């Protein structure tokens, strides 16, 4: 599994552009609480596991504040997974590896991504995907349109399989050089983006 695209600035910049579009769509809808106008009120983030040269693309989270009721509205995101410290693309890839033994998984994480995660964290993530993910309002809402073959876990690896039909790299916005894994990852984090909305703590 090649992960070299994680070192490509264009990949991270593209994810930020997706987040911007999602945020603007949310702003245009107005406040979900009172219908008032939403003003930009981004807040800083400093996620783990992102190479220093790409952290500028994760320095802030798009968010809005209502001009009337002052309540905050934070849209979905392909860069951030709730309040979790690891960015969504890295967390999703890491979680997809967690179907081997914990020790083997930790070795892969260190070798592929240069990050060290405790056994306790690995177990917590696996438990969340297995038990909590399928109970979320998001999953209950989309499970009716997900092909039957992909309704059961393990997650999120099963979600990568769901987007396995994506094979033509030429038509992708990142250009012909983008890898199949990168395409699938972008599709998966876009699919999961609503999970990051609001104050959801995710995993």
Image (cartoon, rainbow, N blue to C red):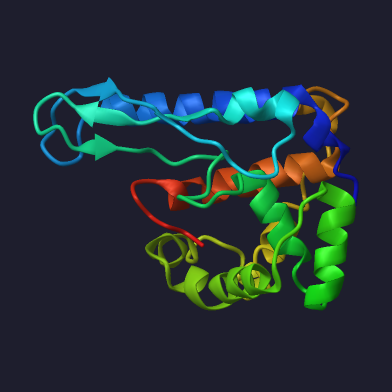
Q: Position of residue 202 (x, y in %)?
A: 47, 59
Taking the image as shown, residue 86 lies to the left or right of residue 132, namely right
Placement of 129 over or under 198, stated as above or below: below
Q: Position of residue 12 (x, y in %)?
A: 68, 29
Nearer-the-camera pick, 35 or 112: 112
Q: Position of residue 98 (x, y in %)?
A: 75, 69
| Residue appearing at x 58%, y 72% in the figure | 124
Taking the image as shown, residue 42 lies to the left or right of residue 134, namely left
Q: Position of residue 145 (x, y in %)?
A: 51, 60
Placement of 77 over or under 132, stated as above or below: above
Placement of 185 over or under 169, stated as above or below: below
Placement of 137 over or under 92, stated as above or below: below
| Residue appearing at x 65%, y 53% in the figure | 91
Residue 173 seen from this side: no
| Residue appearing at x 50%, y 35% in the figure | 45
Answer with the quarter of the image where residue 135 lies: bottom left
| Residue appearing at x 15%, y 41% in the figure | 33
Residue 170 seen from this side: yes
């Amino acid at each position: 599994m090649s992960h070299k695209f994680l070192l490509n600035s264009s990949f991270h910049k593209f994810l930020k552009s997706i987040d911007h579009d999602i945020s603007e769509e949310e702003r245009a809808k107005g406040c979900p609480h009172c219908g008032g106008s939403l003003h930009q009120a981004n807040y800083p983030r400093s996620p783990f596991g992102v190479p220093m040269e790409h952290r500028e693309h994760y320095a802030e989270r798009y968010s809005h504040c209502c001009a009337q009721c002052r309540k905050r509205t934070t849209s979905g995101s392909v860069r951030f997974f709730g309040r979790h410290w690891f960015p969504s693309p890295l967390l999703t890839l890491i979680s997809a590896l967690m179907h081997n033994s914990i020790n083997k998984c930790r070795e892969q994480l260190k070798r592929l991504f240069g990050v060290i995660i405790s056994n306790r964290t690995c177990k917590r993530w696996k438990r969340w995907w297995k038990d909590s993910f399928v109970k979320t309002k998001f999953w209950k809402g989309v499970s009716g349109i997900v092909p039957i073959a992909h309704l059961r876990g393990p997650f999120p690896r099963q979600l990568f399989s769901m987007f396995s039909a994506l094979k033509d790299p030429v038509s992708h916005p990142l250009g012909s050089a983008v890898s199949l894994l990168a395409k699938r990852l972008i599709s998966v984090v876009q699919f999961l983006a609503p999970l990051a909305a609001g104050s959801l703590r995710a995993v």
